[in-house]
Image (cartoon, grey):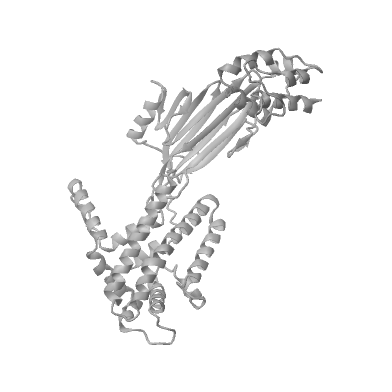
Amino acid sequence: MKKSALAFLAVMAVLTAGCPRNYYQLTLTPRGNVMERELIFFRADTESQSADGRRFLAFDSNELAAIAALYPKDQLKSEDNRHAARGEFMGRLPGDIGGSGWYKRLTTSMGAAGFYAERYRGNDDLAGAIEKKYQAADQLADLAVGWSQAHFGRESNYKKLHHFLGQDFRRDLKNFSLYFERADSAYKEDGWSNSKGYLSRLGQYLIERGYATLNDSPALIRVGDVDDDSVLCTLLQRLIARKLDVTDGQPLPRTLMFLADPSALGNSLKEYLTGTEAYRAELRAWETKKRADPEARKPEPEEALDELVIVLLGMESSSEEDRITVRLSLPSEPLRTNGKWDETHKQAMWDSNLPDGKQPGRLPAFGYADWVEPREDFQKDHLGGVVLTGENLLQYCIWQTGLGEEYLSEWERFVAGLHPGKDALDTLEKFRFTREPGQTDTDALKHPADIGRRLIKSALQAKQ
């Protein structure tokens, strides 16, 4: 009984002291259309946090080979269990850390815009993760229905309990998993202060849905006591009694008396689970495992329940999460990024744990940045100064590179002929592409050059 109850009620299991984890230190430097990528990685104990005090451990040979295969030949160096790889990549970035990313540079005569985005490992199939949790919730609800029918099926109001378990309890398990997921994510991001709010919401939800009453509040607080399963058993007994329309003050039916005894309740669950498909699946998995490991332990019936609870709560992975630090070197602070800007080193930085992809609902670590690089010499010669910058330059680069060959070369010849002075704005206003369809300023359809003209004009007007 206790093992399954704790799996339901555990809010967080933090098992970090002394556990080994992988560390990845990634430095990115855009060089024109390619991204230079330098990856330093190693395995070390978490208890030794200083660089000098770390004890470097052997890195997994399969992962080491997989990373080496993604980089140019002879660009992986290793020394004292520390490894470094370097390469230049255009467009799609290598999945060396287990994720996916890309880099794009849009170049024009006025300047360039750069775009970087990368998912670092994790599982981004949120719909699949939720479906997996919901499947576990359905299986748990089915088990609850079957177990209740075996014990309380002859009670006069059993239909009400059956409906509750098959409908309301099924839905509430799914909501429970989502509340727990949010509390877990909040804990991992900001610690207990943020996750407590979700746990309070969960307590409110349980009371609203009739799983406990205000009079049960002291008992609910005591549920976390790992040495007192009788509290949980009493709450369960009261819940089932209410669903069977046994009002407060009425004597409990004899069929419910065993619920107050943790040992009797545990034996009841074990006996029922022994004949379920869930446990037979555990046995089949054990038989397969035993072929490779004759000493493999035969699972207990209640472990079938534990496995479903673990999936429901998204706690399949108990291993220490790896760690990644990313530094993207840029000429100036990016226009948009979810990283932190280090002005001293001119780098956007990300620092995060790496979920292993087995935890449903955990968003992967992710980094992005957009930036611009004005071409100062060209703008000074043709606009009289570096005026097209920031968001305007980024939009200009997007617009011009999307013109297509029929307009691109003509536009480049046009801006190369611009000269600073009072006539520049008038020259911009009058420009039309040679093959542009006849239109007037009142036409609903815009001229193909409108966006480019507007961005340059607004930059020049802002200068005046």
Q: In the picture shown, does residue 436 fall above or below 131?
A: above
**Residue 136 location, x and y as percent?**
35, 57
Residue 388 visible at all:
no
Relative horizontal placement of residue 442, taking residue 248 as reference (left or right): right
Relative horizontal placement of residue 25, taking residue 392 as reference (left or right): left
Q: In the picture shown, does residue 331 fall above or below 366?
A: above
Q: In the picture shown, does residue 301 fall above or below 93?
A: below
For the N terminus, the image quarter is bottom left
Quadrant in the picture for residue 196: bottom right
**Residue 222 location, x and y as percent?**
46, 71
For the C terminus, the image quarter is top right
**Residue 431 location, x and y as percent?**
71, 18
Q: Nearer the viewer, residue 442 or 348?
A: 442
- Residue at position x 45%, y 39% in the image: 54
Quadrant in the picture for residue 272: bottom left
**Residue 126 location, x and y as percent?**
44, 47
- Residue at position x 48%, y 23% in the image: 90
Q: Nearer the viewer, residue 124 or 401?
A: 401
Q: How many marks?
A: 0
Residue 176 visible at all:
yes
- Residue at position x 56%, y 56% in the image: 194
